[in-house]
Amino acid sequence: MEYKIRSISEGEYILLNDFLYEAIFVPPGISPPPKSIINQPELQVYVSGFGTKKDDIGLIAEIDNKPIGAVWVRIMDDYGHIDDDTPSFAISLYKDYRGMGIGTALMKEMLHILKDKGYKQASLAVQKANYAVKMYKKTGFEIVDENEEEYIMLCHL
């Protein structure tokens, strides 16, 4: 399957709401939450006003000009917050496109961009049961902290 990775355009920032919902890990056998969950303040920090801060960077993966995934970073006080100089990651793909290496490619491209922009590290939070933990480790993230449900992971650039 051929895909393309490119910068997100301003007109596509609204898509981050859909990708934020897709990023919510739902363990097998559990019903997904209502889409309105993304309106909670602790989730809106990922998308509200995206593009208005200098540290807001987003990429889209597309197939046949149709967005199928996104990775975006910003410095925010989110679950994976390390400090005010470390961008936090959000990434998701529509279900039909997972497990094909597209997420890994998105992660690697974003890490390359962050390094080129002079950032020293990037962070993320991920639920321990999420299959994506392996992908994050493969792209250079290490577990630096954890709580009952989540790992806080950091990648040195």
Image (cartoon, helix red, strand yellow):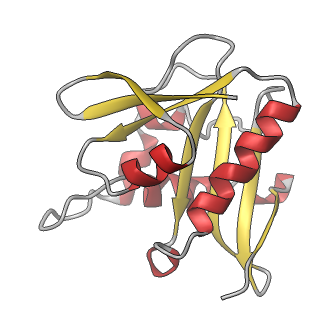
Q: Residue at x 72, y 38 (%)?
A: 50
The picture places residue 45, in percent across and down from the top left corner, at: 54, 31
Q: Residue at x 64, y 20 (%)?
A: 86
* Tally of numbered tags: 0
Locate residue 61 relative to residue 79 in the image: left or right: right
**Front position in the image: 92 or 151:** 151
In the picture shown, does residue 142 fall above or below 67? above
Locate residue 107 relative to residue 3 in the image: left or right: left
Q: Residue at x 17, y 28 (%)?
A: 148
Locate the C terminus by quadrant.
Answer: top right
The picture places residue 154, in percent across and down from the top left corner, at: 52, 27
Quarter residue 56 falls in: top right
Is residue 97 visible to us here? yes
**Front position in the image: 93 or 37:** 93
Q: Residue at x 23, y 23 (%)?
A: 147
The picture places residue 103, in percent across and down from the top left corner, at: 57, 62
